């Protein structure tokens, strides 16, 4: 079973690997830095369209972040 903690960890890892800051990511997504921080803490999950844009900006495979694949 996939947990929110696993998804949060993958999202954190993907952001670290991108070398982009939370502020830079927020600017590219048109949201606040605090919203990005909430996503990374697992307080809330992004809406589907924000998640799609987040994956695009980070050049990340959505299946990886959602723990549906290991690569």
Image (cartoon, grey):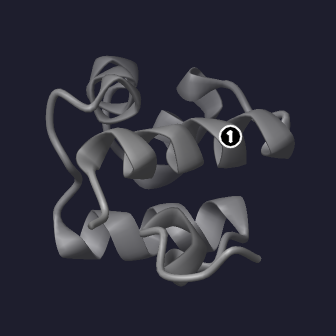
Give the number of callouts: 1
Frontmost residue, 58 versus 40: 40
Provide the residue designation for mark 1. 13
Residue at image x 48%, y 69%? 67
Q: Quadrant of residue 38?
A: top left
- Up/down of 21 relative to 53, above or below: above
Element class at badge 1:
helix
Residue in the picture at 27% in, 52% down: 3
> Which residue does the image show at 72% across and 70% down from the upper left?
59
Q: Position of residue 18 (x, y in %)?
A: 81, 45
Badge 1 crowding class, 10 Å Cα cut-off, few under 14, some 14 to 19, many 20 or more, is few
- In front of the other: 40 or 26: 40
- Reply above or below: 63 against 16: below
Q: Is 32 left, or right, of 59 in this rendering? A: left
70 to 34, vertically: above or below? below
> In x, y percent, where is residue 44?
14, 38
């Amino acid at each position: 079973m996939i947990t929110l903690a696993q998804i949060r960890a993958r999202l954190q890892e993907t952001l670290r690997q991108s070398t982009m800051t939370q502020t830079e990511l927020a600017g590219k997504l048109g949201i606040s830095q605090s919203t990005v921080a909430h996503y990374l803490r697992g307080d809330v999950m992004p809406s589907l369209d924000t998640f799609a844009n987040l994956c695009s900006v980070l050049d990340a495979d959505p299946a990886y972040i959602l723990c549906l694949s290991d690569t």
